[in-house]
Amino acid sequence: MSLVDLDVGIATLKGDREVQQDSFDHAKENLADLIVNDYEFKTKNYEKAFVNGFKQEDYLLRLTFGAEKQGGTTATAALFLKNSDTFYIANVGDSSAVLGTRPGRIPEAIPVSTDDRTDDEVELERLAKAKAQIRKGRLIRPGHSVNMTRALGDFDFKTPYTPTGKDWITPVPHTYKIDLIPEVDEFLVIASDGLWNVYDEQTVVEVITDELDKGYDVHKLANALAAAAINHSKPSDNVTVMLIFFVWNKDSPPE
């Protein structure tokens, strides 16, 4: 039994809260190419290729928009290989990825990314070494504060602009190698915090599982989830949802 195809639905809806889109749009257009064209990708060192691609995109953002520009973007990237039940994932910030699995009757949500916030023990230790300034769970610089510890952009929180001479926010992603369980693991959902701030991971996985069982396709589901998050509260954030359904092929029985 093997993973033979992916059915992908993507939805991006704009909320009514004013946000900067420049960094998001640039990363959306360039990050994937930077990863797959990296030397480490060609040598099948995929996790290192993720790191190099994220760092290169961060560098290009600085060149394109200038280091004085405030604001940045989260990013999550997933790599699926042909004829392989293993996939790789990397992220910075709080755009999260969750695996929808059903080992029994009840579906389960398994996080496969890391939310980079100041309350994370590992991140807090790194920030302490960098002598970062934190107030009420947010990194602070003059006229600007964020609650993320890893991101693309946000250059006023990076060297050489921090008063301590060290990166408070880093573009280096967390990377993971995930081995899928055929037919038990059913889908992957990647979404911005506009979804996760409204619905918890288990709720999202249960809703998706229930609707897929009823015959709804991933494209309509992605749009429905994004719309529900947008309409849940005002003002609302922009929401991006990517739903990746796994198509498993059972090996043919011997004749």
Image (cartoon, grey):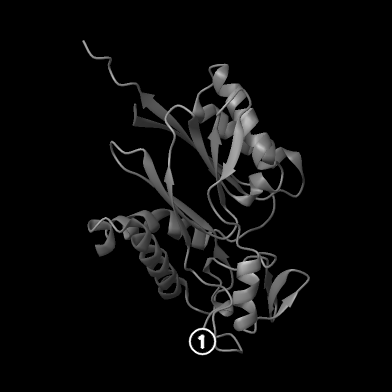
**Residue positioned most to the left:** 255
Residue under label 1? 160
Please tell me which residue is depicted at 57% across the width and 60% down the height of the picture: 93
Residue 242 appears in the picture as rendered: no
Instruction: Using a 10 Å C-alpha cutoff, classify the residue at mark 1 as few (fewer than 14 neighbours), some (14 to 19) or many (20 or more).
Output: few
255 horizontally vs 106: left or right: left
* Quarter placement of the N terminus: top left
**Which residue is rendered at x = 60% and y = 62% of the image?**
116
The correct choice, above or below, for 99 with respect to 49 in the image is above
The image quadrant that residue 151 belongs to is bottom right
- The spot of residue 179 in percent (x, y) is 42, 42
Determine the secondary structure under disc 1: loop
**x, y percentage for residue 155?**
54, 76
* Residue 71 picture location, percent across and down: 58, 68
Quarter the C terminus occupies: top left
Q: Is residue 194 above or below residue 207?
A: below
Dividing the picture into quarters, in which one does residue 4 lie? top left
Is residue 19 something one can see in this rendering?
yes
Numbered disc total: 1
Q: Residue 159, image x and y in percent?
A: 51, 83
Front-most of residues 235 and 128 = 128
Could you tell me which residue is drawn at 41 percent across and 73 percent down? 59
Q: Between residues 33 and 18, which one lies in front from this camera angle? A: 33
Measured along the vertical axis of the image, is residue 204 above or below residue 90? above
185 relative to 237, above or below: above
203 horizontally vs 50: left or right: right
* Amino acid type assigned to the residue bearing label 1 in the image: Pro
Specify the farthest residue to the front. 254
